[in-house]
Image (cartoon, helix red, strand yellow):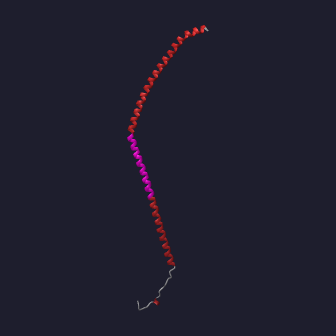
Amino acid sequence: METVNQFLNQCIPALTVLVLILIIILCIRLIVLLGNVNKTVTKVDGTVDMVNDYLTELKVPVRVLVNVSMSVEALRAASEDTARRMSESISEHLQQLSDWIKKFWDSLSQIKKDATNVEVVTITPDTQDEGDL
């Protein structure tokens, strides 16, 4: 047991140095990583600023597109309403025309019926007064 204890006492400084070297390497890599993260964040910050500028430039065209879209929608709604009203008006006038033709046809039929029911009276010269001529 004594030899194990002496061996461990001799190994502890070497292991401590090894652990310190590993910690130093880890710290160096961490510093390099943080430097890369800083560069990446700087690039991303520039990219975000560039995208923000593009979005600011797109506000006016987007507004124009929205206005055009709203105008097209208003035109569609107005033309739909006009077509509906025109269709209703044509339908109403066609109904009136149909009623008028039906009444006219009925009156023609009535005239035909009356014409068939008329008695024909013939006037002969015997019945006329010769002095009136």
Question: Measured from the top left, where is residue 39 in percent x and y?
Answer: 42, 25
- Residue 40 % position (x, y): 44, 27
Q: Is residue 124 left or right of residue 6?
A: left
Whether residue 121 is in magenta: the answer is no
Picture quadrant where residue 1 is located: top right
The stretch drawn in magenta includes residue 79: yes
Q: Is most of the magenta stretch helix, strand or loop?
A: helix
Which residue is rendered at x = 52% and y = 13% of the image?
A: 16
Q: Which residue is at the front of the view, 30 or 54?
A: 30
Q: At 40% from the left edge and 42% from the top edge, which residue is drawn?
A: 62
Query: Where does residue 18 sit, x and y in percent of width and height?
Result: 52, 14
In-image side of 4 versus 52 (left or right) = right
The quadrant of the image that shows the C terminus is: bottom left
In terms of depth relative to the viewer, which is nearer, 83 or 70? 70
Q: Which quadrant of the figure has residue 84?
A: bottom left
Nearer to me, 17 or 61? 17
Image height check: is 53 above or below 94?
above
The magenta segment is: 59-85
In which image quadrant can residue 51 be found? Answer: top left
Q: Position of residue 99 (x, y in %)?
A: 48, 67
